[in-house]
């Protein structure tokens, strides 16, 4: 293996499990809403699109938190910014969030860039605290801001589709955002930019003397990680039909992103996906079995502890270390 | 011949603390090797940090190839053709050998040139070629040391700054490391070396620069430095005089 190129040494067969399995999964997900032809399965649609939402967010968070090593527990400010931006436009001008979602992502990105310039000067515990402070500032501002409804937030009109089809637009929008977010995460992981980001997570001084513009790289990564979270916020606002500070600006959403990444393996492409799937479906399973008794929170915590005891680098990270990771999950 | 690096009246220190180096002067020409020696706390490593821009000089001038580089960002200075090997091993243990070599050519825009340089580095250090996809943190000490210098080769700098290359290495590895440094020097790269092990450092250098308390004490051809009476005072204290 004297070749530096990324290509593997063995000749790959025409149908590689690495591409086939994800593609089959994608086709299945595209076809899934067809179940609505056989009765109302809105619960299935809801759980799956909820997973799309969190995979989009945890894969985006992974760019700055996983590759870059900056643990932000205030990343849902971008979710809130996207939701309020598109929600406000919908309520005032009647333009659906489906049209403004990408613009909402862009607003979140620009805002992320500006915030990153300030908060990314510090790292470690100081950065974590600054990210929580950002979230608290947003909560207070939006709780008081009359233009966007203060603590009541904004109520949005419901779409006019029949009930079994009303979730389907959100399903496809979030599916597209999820695929795009995973693609972004994959591209970063395999680019020169991603290499620099991982170097920075190890040691900023060492990276700087390698010729890396450390500040620019980490601020750009922070801004990139905001884009799909903002866009997903816009879609989520339309899905809930209301945007309220006490729903969007709570630390639970950011904590979920972080925990899902850590559970699956932060700094890997497929880690956030696996972590999100495990956490959401486990949580739903417990809810379905035992009802909303808060037992789900307790058992999800227990799951996290036990998993991290045996998979300290996350599920994907640890399996990779032990060379046990199935090929179709090994995306770097 | 003009100076590659010209440092005049440099003053530097950390944070709001006192000045660590005062009025320091250092010049180096192409393909020269200078070794800075001096007791602990003399400010040897600080000089290197001030050149690289990791530490911004408080006053004084630093010129590289006639261009003023004092106060510039470290990454900009590095892209002019300076390579800095900090005290601890200058590799990224969480990356593979191939990725570490790519980091060496990070500032190159030309992809083909970068690949050529990496190939060249692998030819020089064939052991690394067999381990391209291994995490560099799992290499043996000697292999990691090879990787450090392979990366430096890939950068092809005009000036190399090496901070305490023998620190914490087994004796056999120290020899190997100085062999790498000799190879670098013979390829025409100027080297400024900071070394605690004064005897070994001077052996590898053309000139010895002696520092104490942030000041230049004297500079002489390396083979004459050890004979100087002032060296004994610096290392053994005034008592050695009697």
Image (tube, coloured by chain):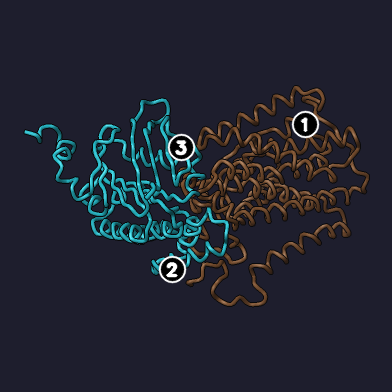
Chain colours: A brown, B cyan
- Observer-side mark, 3 or 1, equals 3
Can residue A299 be seen from the camera position used here? no
Instruction: Give percent across and percent down for residue A133.
Output: 61, 29
Q: Residue at x 47, y 67 (%)?
A: B119
| Left or right of B73 in this view: B61 | left
> Which residue occupies the foreground of this view, B233 or A14?
B233
> Which residue occupies the foreground of this view, A197 or A40?
A197
Query: Which mark is on residue A244?
Result: 1
Parent chain of label 3: B
| SS at badge 1 | loop
| SS at badge 3 | loop
Instruction: Give percent across and percent down for residue A15.
Output: 67, 75
Q: Is residue A80 above or below residue A193?
A: above
> Which residue occupies the foreground of this view, A218 or B162?
B162
Q: Is residue A222 above or below residue A187?
A: above
Q: How many marks?
A: 3
Query: Which mark is on residue B73?
Result: none
- Observer-side mark, 2 or 1, equals 2
Tag 3 residue: B70
Q: Residue at x 42, y 30 (%)?
A: B59
The image quarter in which residue B127 lies: bottom left
Parent chain of label 2: B
Can residue A280 be seen from the camera position used here? yes
- Observer-side mark, 2 or 3, equals 3
Q: Is residue A223 above or below residue B115?
A: above
Counting other residues with Cα less than 10 Å from the Cα at mark 3, is it few (<14), some (14-19), or many (20 or more)?
A: many
Q: Residue pushed farthest front?
A: B1
């Amino acid at each position: 293996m004297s070749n530096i190129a990324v290509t593997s040494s063995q000749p790959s067969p025409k149908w590689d499990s690495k591409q086939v399995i994800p593609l089959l999964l994608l086709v299945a997900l595209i076809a899934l809403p067809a179940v609505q032809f056989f009765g109302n399965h809105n619960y299935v649609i809801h759980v799956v699109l909820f997973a799309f939402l969190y995979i989009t967010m945890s894969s985006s968070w992974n760019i700055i938190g996983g590759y870059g090593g900056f643990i932000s527990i205030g990343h849902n400010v971008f979710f809130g910014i996207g939701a309020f931006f598109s929600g406000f436009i919908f309520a005032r001008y009647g333009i659906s969030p489906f049209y403004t979602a990408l613009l909402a992502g862009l607003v979140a990105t620009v805002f992320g860039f500006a915030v990153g310039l300030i908060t990314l000067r510090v790292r470690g515990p100081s950065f974590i605290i600054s990210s929580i402070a950002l979230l608290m500032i947003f909560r207070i501002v939006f709780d008081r801001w009359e233009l966007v409804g203060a603590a009541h937030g904004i109520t949005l009109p419901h779409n006019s589709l029949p009930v079994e089809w009303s979730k389907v637009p959100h399903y496809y929008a979030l599916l597209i955002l999820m695929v795009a977010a995973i693609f972004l995460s994959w591209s970063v992981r395999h680019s020169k930019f991603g290499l620099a980001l991982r170097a920075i997570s190890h040691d900023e001084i060492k990276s700087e003397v390698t010729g890396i513009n450390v500040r620019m790289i980490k601020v750009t990564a922070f801004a990139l990680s905001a884009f799909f979270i903002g866009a997903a916020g816009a879609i989520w606002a339309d899905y809930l039909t209301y945007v309220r500070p006490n729903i969007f600006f709570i630390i639970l959403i950011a904590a979920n992103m972080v925990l899902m990444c850590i559970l699956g393996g932060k700094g890997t492409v497929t880690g956030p996906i696996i972590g999100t799937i495990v956490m959401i479906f486990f949580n739903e399973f417990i809810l379905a079995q035992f009802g909303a008794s808060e037992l789900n929170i307790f058992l999800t915590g227990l799951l996290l502890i036990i998993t991290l005891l045996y998979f300290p680098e996350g599920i994907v990270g640890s399996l990779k270390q032990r060379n046990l990771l199935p090929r179709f999950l090994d995306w770097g | 011949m003009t100076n590659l690096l010209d440092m005049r009246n440099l003053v530097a220190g950390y944070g709001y603390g006192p000045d660590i180096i005062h009025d320091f002067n250092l010049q180096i020409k192409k393909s020269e090797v200078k070794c800075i020696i001096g007791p602990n706390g003399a400010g040897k490593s600080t000089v290197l940090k001030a050149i690289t821009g990791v530490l911004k000089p408080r006053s004084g001038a630093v010129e590289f190839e006639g261009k003023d580089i004092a106060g510039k960002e470290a990454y900009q200075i590095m892209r002019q053709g300076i390579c800095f090997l900090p005290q601890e091993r200058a590799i990224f243990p969480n990356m593979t050998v191939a990725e570490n070599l790519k980091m060496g050519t990070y500032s190159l825009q030309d992809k083909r040139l970068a690949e050529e340089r990496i190939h060249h580095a692998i030819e020089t250090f064939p052991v690394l070629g067999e381990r391209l996809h291994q995490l560099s943190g799992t290499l043996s000490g000697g292999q990691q040391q090879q990787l450090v210098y392979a990366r430096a080769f890939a950068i092809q700098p005009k000036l190399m700054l090496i901070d305490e290359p023998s620190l914490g290495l087994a004796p056999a590895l120290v020899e190997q490391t100085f062999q790498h440094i000799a190879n670098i020097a013979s390829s025409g790269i100027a080297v400024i070396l900071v070394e605690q092990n004064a005897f070994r450092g001077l052996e590898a250098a053309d000139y010895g620069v002696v520092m104490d308390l942030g000041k230049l004490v004297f500079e002489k051809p390396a083979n004459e430095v050890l004979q100087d009476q002032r060296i004994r005072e610096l290392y053994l204290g005034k008592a050695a005089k009697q």
